[in-house]
Amino acid sequence: MLGAQLNDKTMERLVESAFGTLPEKAMAVGSSWDHNADNKSSRMDVSNKMKLTLAKYDDESFEITATGTIEKAAGEVPAAKEGEEDEGEQAAQAKEMLAKMEIKNGKISGSSKISRKDGFLLDSKSLMTMDLSMPSPMGGDMTINQKVTITTK
């Protein structure tokens, strides 16, 4: 059942979640860098555009804060992944809904605390909110107000 969700991008996200999102070069407290993450492991193709900031550090760990936006990625709705069904009326309906989906007010924020001893993520918190609008299979349009909070320890 999970075969379609276990792909290169999913594995990349899992590794990144274990180590946090790090800058490519050394940073001073208060320094920021951009991080863009495209979610190519899902049929709902979104792009997270974030500004990450080194908030603080001590001998044991360092903390990174994030703020940004969630947007619909440009391009076509991805085809079904291996193990997913991409035939029939339901699949065509779902693909049409995703193609016409709009994301409004997409926001992301959070923080990560990372160990300086081994580089592993100690804990993180993120909050994502967005308003999704798309055609309803019953006719007309539907709006979904989504709020996702993720806490990792």
Image (spheres, helix red, strand yellow):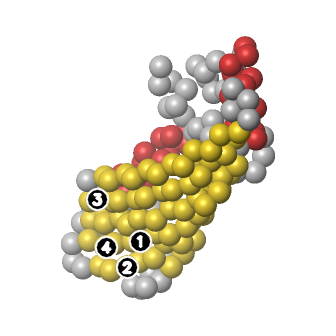
Using the numbered discs, state the Cα–Cα distance from disc 4 to disc 1 in whole angstroms: 10 Å
Q: Residue at x 39, y 71 (%)?
A: 64
> Marks 1 and 2: CB-CB under 8 Å?
yes
> Marks 3 and 4: CB-CB under 8 Å?
no
| Residue bearing the label numbered 3 | 123
Residue 140, quarter of picture:
top right
State the SS at label 3: strand
Using the numbered discs, state the Cα–Cα distance from disc 4 to disc 2 in whole angstroms: 8 Å
Which mark is first along the chain, 4 or 3?
4
State the SS at label 2: strand
| Residue bearing the label numbered 1 | 65
Q: Residue at x 75, y 51 (%)?
A: 74
Residue 27, quarter of picture:
bottom left
> Marks 4 and 1: CB-CB under 8 Å?
no
Using the numbered discs, state the Cα–Cα distance from disc 3 to disc 1 in whole angstroms: 12 Å
In the rendered structure, which amino acid carries the disc numbered 4? Phe
User: As displayed, is residue 70 above or below residue 10?
Assistant: below
| Residue bearing the label numbered 2 | 55
